[in-house]
Amino acid sequence: MNLTRALGIVDAAVLRVLAITTALLIVFRAMPAHADNVGVLIKQLESDSDKVRLAAVLNLTKLGDAKAILPLVKVVSNDSDDAVREAAAVALGKLVDPKSKGSIKNLVINALKKAEANDSSGRVKQQAGRSLAALGASGGGTTTQPSTGGKNGIYVNIGPMSSKTGDASVDSKMRPAMVKVSQQTLTRVASSMATTWSGGSAPTSAQLNQKGFQGFYVDGTLNELKVSGDTVSCKISMLLASYPDKSVFGFLNGGAKVQGGSSPKDIALASDDCVAAVVEDLIAKKIVPTIKTKAGIP
């Protein structure tokens, strides 16, 4: 291989990497659009959409504003969706602090005790018990597993992924690649979250409860992979659910454009890079933080 050709190959690789760094256009939408404004988010708690209400609860939890406490008491007591009530129970356990008025804290404790005793969802009951424990209030009778604070206390089951490019050979390649990137990213950014279980099989609900683990499920779909000249674009959707019941509470969408060479080999490499970059970003920046919020981990 002559020097000119070698430099050309190196240049193509560098350009591809630079394109990922500078031209990556990730568009995140963990839930329908929301504003990081407490008043707006509180209003969204009354939305007809379960997804909008859940997103509002999660973002109010992150903002940590005490003005959200009373609206969230209403949510944990009355919302029609199990996942929204569960998230509200998490939020109340985090938002009430030593600065909170005694009357407010009592309202929260009473609401959580009612949820622990009477809610139709076992997960809501369990989370209400955890939040009561965090607030120093004894639960009303539901036995809950102790929280491990995230240290080996979270199990993430990664689904088989799917690919809908219309090219069977590409689809068969991308599915395992997406699984691999998801596993690697979780290991890198959230090493305390387990993606495997002793014995090799996925755990049952009883096994998770026995060890005090909370279970989550992640899956994704490559919806589009397009080539235009030397540019590859891809669009991926991912979902986040509880495990093992797979009750979905989060939807995410990401897209990217990667510029490289125009040869078949360069296009294939750019396609791999595009898909890997989107999956990695969605896992690291959206899915892991959402899991931590749902699990009540700082």
Image (cartoon, rainbow, N blue to C red):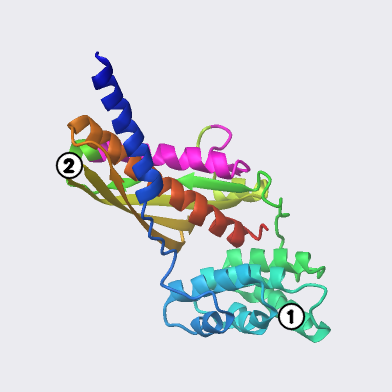
Give the main secondary structure of the magenta stretch: helix
Q: Residue at x 44, y 63 (%)?
A: 30
Q: Is residue 127 above or below residue 80?
A: above
Residue 127: image quadrant is bottom right
Q: Position of residue 226 (x, y in %)?
A: 20, 48
Q: Position of residue 89 (x, y in %)?
A: 64, 71
Label 1 amino acid?
Asn
Q: Does label 1 or label 2 sit earlier along the sequence?
A: 1
Left/right placement of residue 55 relative to residue 113 reads: left
Does the magenta segment cover residue 115? no
Q: Secondary structure at mark 1?
A: helix
Q: Residue at x 55, y 39 (%)?
A: 187
Span shown in magenta: 171-199
Q: Which residue is mark 2?
A: 167
Q: Is residue 275 above or below residue 93?
A: above
Q: Which mark is residue 110?
A: 1
Residue 141: image quadrant is bottom right
Label 2 amino acid?
Asp
Kindly tell me whether residue 159 is visible in this rendering: no
Quadrant that contains the C terminus: bottom right
- In space, the residues marked 1 and 2 are separated at their CA atoms by 56 Å
Kindly tell me whether residue 137 is visible in this rendering: yes
